Image (spheres, helix red, strand yellow):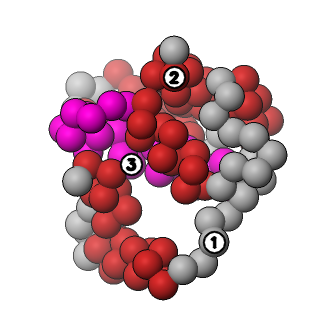
Amino acid sequence: MRRLSAVLAAGLVSTAALSTPAFAQTNVLEIAKVVNGGIATADCGTVSTGLKATGLVGAETTRGELVASLNKAVGQDSALRLVAAPTINTIGDRALECGVVKPDPVTPLNQAITFASQLSSQAGLPELRNLLPAL
């Protein structure tokens, strides 16, 4: 049931992306970019309604807790977790931007991961925060 809820939440949040002409491309990386772009610009009302309807967020849920719940719903298959990580992080980012979840507490580890993710992104490499869930 939890896995179904996570899939429904991601589906609700990314519905707008699926209707774009670029979705017709067969390149998986391009499809992921389109879906993530749709999530990143999704209406905050849609994000809030979708995540709250699935029970993935509550009044005190942090971004990290949402991401952990979505990762748990994906399961233990490390290949699937690696592929899903950017989308899950995009959902977490958009939920934070929309005020659906609270920011994570600032810790030295969080700061280090954020800094390393920014550096790897600037270098054109996958972000560290996207790789950690697959480990």
Q: CA distance from mark 2 to mark 1?
A: 25 Å
Q: Main secondary structure of the magenta part?
A: helix
Q: Which residue corresponds to mark 3? A: 86
67 above or below 5? below
In reply to whether residue 94 is colored magenta, the answer given is yes
* Mark before the other along the chain sequence, 1 or 3: 3
Dot 3, crowdedness within 10 Å: few (<14), some or many (≥20)? Answer: some
Magenta segment: 74-98
18 above or below 96? above
Q: Position of residue 64 (x, y in %)?
A: 55, 56
The amino acid type found where label 1 is placed reads Pro
Disc 3 element: helix
Disc 1 element: loop
Dot 2, crowdedness within 10 Å: few (<14), some or many (≥20)? Answer: some
Q: Is residue 11 visible?
A: no
Q: Image quarter for residue 51?
A: top right
Q: Residue at x 61, y 55 (%)?
A: 63
Q: Relative to 30, is 21 on the left or the right?
A: right
Q: CA distance from mark 1 to mark 3?
A: 21 Å
Viewer-closest of 91 and 1:
1
Dot 1, crowdedness within 10 Å: few (<14), some or many (≥20)? Answer: few
Q: Which residue corresponds to mark 1? A: 105
Q: Which residue corresponds to mark 2? A: 2
* Mark before the other along the chain sequence, 2 or 3: 2
Q: Position of residue 129 (x, y in %)?
A: 37, 62
Q: Residue at x 33, y 31 (%)?
A: 75
Disc 2 element: helix
